[in-house]
Image (cartoon, rainbow, N blue to C red):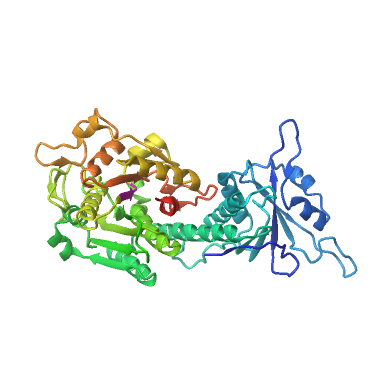
């Protein structure tokens, strides 16, 4: 990942900066002139250029996410000296909107896309003379996060080179320990998001459960974390009937991975994050339509979020113990595939009647949650999964569906969602719908028999609740925001990495 640094003096004349970015805000009510912000008048004076006139000519409104690059001409002949001689040859005018963290993330993202391929970009974006220390830190973090998140390019496996990415971002006009710490936190959070994107975007011809388990082991070992991997024999001996059934139709055998971080002064809480890890999902015998299979390499995004969260928590040095549990399987079609009508016995003995093999995620999560409850002694259980299409029907593509049994945990996650821009909506665990997950031939039915109840995301959450015991528990259904059809602001096409920044922010503030 490329870096973001902070300086309190403008490093513009040493030849290492390819562009300088300055900020403009929308006109005040009753006025039609864009509002310059800190650094813009100074740059205009230094360059001898009317930047306000250039912005108006470009049709800028100052909205967050706008960016316009001015390429300054070079002189003809050695005797001509232009006002900007020795200065960076590009000026990027960036809209900052209302200057909230969301607007500044969008401004940072727009800057990243406008300067892709440059080595070093110096920016006054987000620098305001009226900011207190906390506001300056918050603004710097937002700009750095937006810039780094939008810098991501999906790794290529062909002969053509990967797309160029921006170089170092230098945030001008800022100093102090709080700002430096905020920018470092942005780096940790975006590194976690990049990891989720990389793992989820990896083709399933490469990525199977064994590959994911190996990647988790390597990354965790490099970070000095404890790792445990259960293979098919251990899963069978332990009674993980859900993971084994889902993976039975594939030539790639399932795994369960545990990665644990313990802080030096383990006086906090123990948080376990369980992530759905379906490395490819055909739907099994209840096979998906062709179009629905195309993005299914990202169906293990929940497991990637869990792994990135524990790694990020360790790097950030959070005060809580954090454990990631990754139940990994490939839901394929084969002679050993599990079938609608089968009854499975999940970890701990709960029996489940199968109605639809394309609802496999809740089965592997059921095993993972029950195992975590029984063996890891968590204070808080969180699961993350691209679980139901129903969540996207109700909330669209930008909000996750959030369920939970503990008001404080839910409130903390919602606040973190608002701060990070990884939005979530609190959904109800409707007790009257609980009958939908009951079976006449087993303890539970994993897909409702009564279609009149509806609420597919809710009934999936109610099913999962049966496996968490009395633990404080939250469930994030990220089927909507976990994938994106195109780049937009800090979100990139394909796997978005949604959830890693949210959980790291929540863990940093968890009491």
- Looking at the rendering, which quadrant does residue 460 occupy? top left
Q: Position of residue 258 (x, y in %)?
A: 28, 62
Residue occupying the point 30% across, 65% down: 213
Residue 208 image position (x, y, % from top left): 30, 62
Q: Residue at x 24, y 32 (%)?
A: 431
Left or right: residue 76 versus residue 266 is right
Question: Magenta segment range?
Answer: 381-386
Q: Residue furthest left?
A: 441
Q: Position of residue 28 (x, y in %)?
A: 72, 35
Q: How many numbered circles are shown? A: 0
**Residue 444 visible to the viewer:** yes
Q: Is residue 24 above or below residue 263?
A: above
Asked if residue 384 lies in the magenta stretch, the reply is yes
Residue nearest the observer in this picture, 348 or 510: 510
- Compared to 306, does 264 lie above or below? below
Instruction: Examine the image and state in which quarter residue 470 appears.
Output: top left
Is 321 a magenta residue? no
Foreground of the two, 206 or 56: 56
Q: Main secondary structure of the magenta part?
A: strand
Residue 28 lies, with reference to residue 240, above or below; the image says: above
Foreground residue, 51 or 246? Answer: 51
Q: Quadrant location of residue 260?
A: bottom left
Q: Is residue 33 left or right of residue 167?
A: right
Q: Position of residue 331 (x, y in %)?
A: 25, 53
Residue placed furthest toward the right: 79
Residue 495 is at least partly visible in this image? no
């Amino acid at each position: 990942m490329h870096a973001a640094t902070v300086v309190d003096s403008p490093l513009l004349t040493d030849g290492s900066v390819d562009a300088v970015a300055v900020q403009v805000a929308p006109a005040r009510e009753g006025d039609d002139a864009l509002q310059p912000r800190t650094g813009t008048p100074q740059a205009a004076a230094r360059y001898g250029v009317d930047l306000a006139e250039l912005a108006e000519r470009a049709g800028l409104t100052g909205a967050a996410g706008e960016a316009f690059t001015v390429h300054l001409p070079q002189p003809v002949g050695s005797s001509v000296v232009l006002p900007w001689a020795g200065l960076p040859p590009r000026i990027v005018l960036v809209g900052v909107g209302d200057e909230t963290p969301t607007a500044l993330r969008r401004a940072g993202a727009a800057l990243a896309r406008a300067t892709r391929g440059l080595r070093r970009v110096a920016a006054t974006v987000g620098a305001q003379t009226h900011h207190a220390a906390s506001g300056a830190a918050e603004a710097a973090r937002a700009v750095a996060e937006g810039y780094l998140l939008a810098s991501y390019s999906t790794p290529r496996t062909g002969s053509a080179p990967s797309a160029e990415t921006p170089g170092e971002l230098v945030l001008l006009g800022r100093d102090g320990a709080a700002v430096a710490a905020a920018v470092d936190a942005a780096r940790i959070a975006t590194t976690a998001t990049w990891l989720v994107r990389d793992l989820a975007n990896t083709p399933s011809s490469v990525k199977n459960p064994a590959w994911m388990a190996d990647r988790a082991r390597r990354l965790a070992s490099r970070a000095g974390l404890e790792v445990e991997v259960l293979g098919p024999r251990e899963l069978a001996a332990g009674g993980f009937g859900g993971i084994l059934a889902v993976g039975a139709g594939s030539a790639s055998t399932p795994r369960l991975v545990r990665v644990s971080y313990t802080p030096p002064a383990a006086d906090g809480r123990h948080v376990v994050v369980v992530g759905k890890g379906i490395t490819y999902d055909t739907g099994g015998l209840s096979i998906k339509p062709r179009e629905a299979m195309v993005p299914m390499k990202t169906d293990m995004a929940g497991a990637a979020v869990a792994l990135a969260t524990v790694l990020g928590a360790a790097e950030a040095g959070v005060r809580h113990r954090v454990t990631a549990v990754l139940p990994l399987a490939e839901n394929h079609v084969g002679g050993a595939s599990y079938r609608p009508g089968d009854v499975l016995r999940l970890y701990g003995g709960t029996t489940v009647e199968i109605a639809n093999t394309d609802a496999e995620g809740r089965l592997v999560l059921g095993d993972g949650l029950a195992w975590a409850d029984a063996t890891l002694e968590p204070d808080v259980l969180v699961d993350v999964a691209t679980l139901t299409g129903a969540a996207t029907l109700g909330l669209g593509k930008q909000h996750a569906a959030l369920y939970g049994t503990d008001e404080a945990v839910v409130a903390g996650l919602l606040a973190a969602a608002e701060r990070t821009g990884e939005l979530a909506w609190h959904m109800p665990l409707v007790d009257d719908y609980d009958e939908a997950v009951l079976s006449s031939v087993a303890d539970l039915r994993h897909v409702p028999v009564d279609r009149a109840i509806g609420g597919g995301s809710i009934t999936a959450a109610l099913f999962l609740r049966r496996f968490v015991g009395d633990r404080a528990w939250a469930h994030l259904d990220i089927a909507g925001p976990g994938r994106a059809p195109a780049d937009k602001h800090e979100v990139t096409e394909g796997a978005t990495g949604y959830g890693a920044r949210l959980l790291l922010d929540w863990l940093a503030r968890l009491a």
